[in-house]
Amino acid sequence: NFHLKHILTMASRSADEPANHTQLSGKKRKLDATPNDTTDKHDESNDEDLPPSKYFRPAALEANIGRKCPYLDQINRKALDFDFEKVCSVTMSNHNVYGCLVCGAYFAGRSKNSPAYFHALQENHRIFIHTENGKIYCLPDDYEVIDPSLNDIKHNLHPTFTAQEIYALDNNVDYAHALNERDYLPGIIGLNNLNHTDWLNVVIQSLMRVKPLRDYFIRNFDSKRILATRFGELVRKYFNPRNFKGQVSPHELLQAISLESSKKFQIGKQSDPLAFLAWFLNQLHRDLGGNKKHHSSVVSETLQGLITITTYTPKKKKKSTKKVHFNADDDDGDGDDDI
């Protein structure tokens, strides 16, 4: 019995040894693999720090990608307003400005690290229009978008008129349809009151009824002087039959007026309409190259002459009339009323 028990004990031990050896060798292999795993993880972390450009080449754009841009459905025409001063909302620069056709904000540049480029990445707003030449681009891919469905946006940025359209302005009775589902008659629309600027609105709307002056500025007029340029832009927007809205804001013209008049006429400051009219016509006359000679500018050619001023006082029931000569050039150089 003793020998039988001893043999069974030895047999059981020999049966357990391979399992123990396998378990130990498994632990050994696991421990030996630990340094290698650490090295692999370290290598993987280094790979994550490397820029993607090390492994990926940028895909070449198709030759006609601009004619089938997939992001045109982002455009929101109701958010677009080209009446306000076009300055970058980040840098406040007015050089090389692009307008976002999704949210309506303005940003400078379209190259990498520019405000427009970052806006496209952060907000996923892809379509931008250059405020000067009217070209439309897709960012950050940076290709020009060419699509006839965008012509209405380009036209609202810089309205143009044919000779036939200019001739028909005074006889036009066709209402246009704005995006807010309201109808308006081109040339018979309102100017936004920008905080006590009614003195400007009444003068500008009166001048737009002077046909020779209106037609001169509506023919794609461009000038190196900011006052004449801004007035021409406002005239063309005022008579534009394809406006997105039924009113126009004179904000850019007011900015130019404030600058040229050394803030004598500005937003938020009530002014005399007659004093502003005299200053504005004199300044516009000089900006167009006018001098003391008659017909030296469209202002003197149209408005220079004899003016009859009639004043009526209701309480005194008194009426007085006088005739004065209007000179479009400021003789005394003080910029004041020369009437």
Image (spheres, helix red, strand yellow):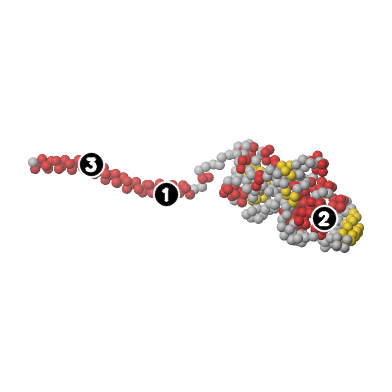
C-alpha distance separating marks 3 and 2: 109 Å
Q: Considering the image in quadrants, where does the N terminus appear?
A: top left
Q: Which mark is residue 205?
A: none
- Find residue 34 and report its horizontal and vertical position in percent: 35, 48
- Which numbered disc, 3 or 1, marks the residue that appears first in the sequence? 3
Q: Which mark is residue 42?
A: 1
Amino acid under disc 1: His
Element on which disc 1 rests: helix
Marks 3 and 1 close (CB-CB < 8 Å): no
C-alpha distance separating marks 1 and 2: 75 Å
Amino acid under disc 3: Pro
Left/right of residue 296 with respect to residue 138 in the rendered view: right
- Which numbered disc, 1 or 2, marks the residue that appears first in the sequence? 1
Answer few, some or many: residues within 10 Å of disc 1's Cα (few below 14, many 20 plus, some between 14 and 19).
few
Of residues 228 and 339, the one drawn nearer to the viewer in this rendering? 339
Residue at image location 82% in from the left, 41% down from the top: 171
Left/right of residue 6 with respect to residue 114 in the rendered view: left
Residue at image location 81% in from the left, 59% down from the top: 275
Amino acid under disc 2: Leu
Of residues 75 and 86, the one drawn nearer to the viewer in this rendering? 75
Of residues 233 and 184, the one drawn nearer to the viewer in this rendering? 184
Q: Which mark is residue 18?
A: 3
- Which numbered disc, 3 or 2, marks the residue that appears first in the sequence? 3
Residue at image location 89% in from the left, 61% down from the top: 318
